[in-house]
Amino acid sequence: MLSYLAYVSLGSLACIAVPVCFVLLVALISHRRHRRKVQTLLQNDSIATLPPACVCGYSQRGLHVPRCPECGRVSGFDATPEELGLTDEQLRLAMDKRQARQRQSP
């Protein structure tokens, strides 16, 4: 026959095990949803086939200046802005003009 302490310890074990199982279940569900989202994004051709913008492989999407923060090269060139004789302001202006042309073209 189990004593009173054994019943108390079984009860406290259940009080801990149920919330832990619930948290693990929620984590598993959210992980699967996240994995499905990532797989959907990777199946999208525009993202999966997007080439890196720099020779070093660093993606320059979302940068305000067409200069790689990793190696310093200018996008589309195999040289740094200093080697091309350009300032960061000139790079920004060129990037703004390019984006304006892309917005105007159908």
Image (spheres, rainbow, N blue to C red):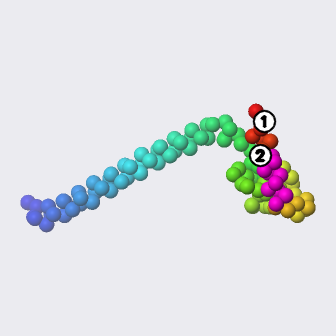
Which segment did they paint magenta?
89-98
Residue at the left extreme, as displayed:
1
Magenta stretch: helix, strand or loop mostly: helix
* Label 1, label 2: how far apart the Cα atoms are: 10 Å
Residue 80 is at least partly visible in this image? no
Is disc 1 placed on a helix, strand or loop? loop
The residue that appears at 69% across and 51% down in the rendered structure is 62
The residue that appears at 73% across and 55% down in the rendered structure is 64
Relative to 104, residue 73 above or below: below
Question: Residue type at mark 1?
Answer: Ser
Label 1–label 2 contact, CB within 8 A: no
User: Which residue is the site of mark 1?
Assistant: 105
Locate residue 53, reporting x and y percent. 77, 49
User: Which residue is the site of mark 2?
Assistant: 99
Locate residue 74, reporting x and y percent. 83, 56
The residue that appears at 61% across and 41% down in the rendered structure is 42
